[in-house]
Image (cartoon, helix red, strand yellow):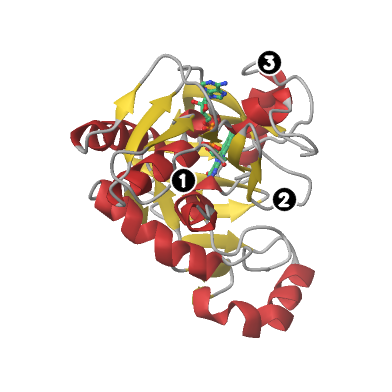
Amino acid sequence: MSLGLDSRREEEVRVVGFGLAGACVALQLLQEGKRVRVLDDGKLGSSVVAAGLVNPVAGRNFEPSWQVREALEVALPFYDWVGEGLFREVPILRLWIAEKDRAKFERKFEVVKDWVAEVNEEGVLWKGGGWLNCPAFLKRAKEKFLEMGGEFVNELDGEAIWCAGAAGLLRGDFEGVAHRCAKGEILTVKIEGWGEERILNRSGWVIPLGDDLYRVGATYAWDGFDRGPTEEGRKKVEEILRSFTGRGFEVVEHVAGVRPIIQNSKPMVIYQKGKGWMVNGLGSKGVIYAPRLFASLTF
Ligand SMILES: Cc1cc2nc3c(=O)[nH]c(=O)nc-3n(C[C@H](O)[C@H](O)[C@H](O)COP(=O)(O)OP(=O)(O)OC[C@H]3O[C@@H](n4cnc5c(N)ncnc54)[C@H](O)[C@@H]3O)c2cc1C
């Protein structure tokens, strides 16, 4: 392969995309002493709109996310290295959906007990989760990349490490990679005086941002990828919010993006001759998995 991915400092490594995946890969390459050139087309990737939630036990079935402990052991120190305070640990209250739900949790207790801070009438309080300020991370990652000698370029030739997110999956950049990307919409709302400091999760979630601001999400849709935020999406997210609080709110921001999901729902790192490496499939858990993917690049 002609990526120049050997141990010599003068060899350059090319990266396409500077979302979560590309930023993590590019910075880790610089840490290893490589010369790194990045091409990013500046389009709105999903990392720009992501809520940044890290929930070790997301979903209805009380299943810890795939390899979540190992992934967070790499991810959290990495985010701290990029910038202090980018990741904030916040307790996550998973509210009971029904009595049956609580019984399900009790059956699963042994599997999830390391993440349990407290169990009460409202639900289970997870520890070890929180949220990454994704826009601030991308900004700081860019600054750090430049400080460490990385270069942004307007074109690249030859094989590269493709961190192109949903755009790359929808284009079919890599042969034989079937996707099931999902569009998502989220709202940022102002709720005066609510004072909720935990992340709330049931069917959907609310993240407290401070200053009476909360991020709420998210919808899942398998079409309309190019349509951006929609009225229908907004209504669905408002319904999610009403399931958590009866308080009045003002919508401050409404954004949409496309989650890069590969058929088996796991991140994927593969090599194809002539094209290079694909680092993709971060799905709805990019914050958990992005920093650990670098270790799978075997050059
Ligand atoms: C509404 C929503 C909410 C989400 N919430 C969360 C959450 O709470 N927690 C979480 O962990 N994850 C969340 N996600 C998922 C998360 O956003 C993704 O897993 C992650 O951002 C994917 O990062 P990426 O770098 O692979 O892709 P992207 O962020 O899309 O980055 C790819 C970059 O490559 C560029 N690019 C593509 N093709 C080319 C090309 N040919 N040439 C040059 N540049 C190119 C794009 O413009 C883009 O900048 C959410 C996603 C959505 C849509």
The nearer-to-camera label among 2 and 3 is: 2
Residue in the picture at 77% in, 37% down: 179
Of the residues shown, which amino acid type is indicated by label 2?
Answer: Ser
Q: CA distance from mark 1 to mark 3?
A: 26 Å
Of the residues shown, which amino acid type is indicated by label 1?
Answer: Ile
Q: CA distance from mark 1 to mark 2?
A: 24 Å
- Which residue bears the numbered disc 2? 265
Q: Quadrant of residue 38?
A: top left
- Cβ–Cβ below 8 Å for labels 1 and 3? no
Task: Identify which residue, 32 or 256, lies in the foreground.
Answer: 32
Q: Disc 1 or 3, which lies upstream in sequence?
A: 1
In this view, which residue lies farthest toward the bottom? Answer: 110
Q: Mark 1: give few (<14), some (14-19) or many (20+) Cα within 10 Å.
A: many
- Which residue bears the numbered disc 3? 226
Regarding residue 299, the answer to whether it shows in the image is yes
- Which residue bears the numbered disc 1? 207
Residue in the picture at 34% in, 55% down: 78
Q: Disc 2 or 3, which lies upstream in sequence?
A: 3
Task: Identify which residue, 62 or 27, lies in the foreground.
Answer: 27
Of the residues shown, which amino acid type is indicated by label 3?
Answer: Asp
> Does the closest atom of ligand 1 sit within 8 Å of the Cβ of label 1?
yes
Q: Secondary structure at mark 1?
A: strand
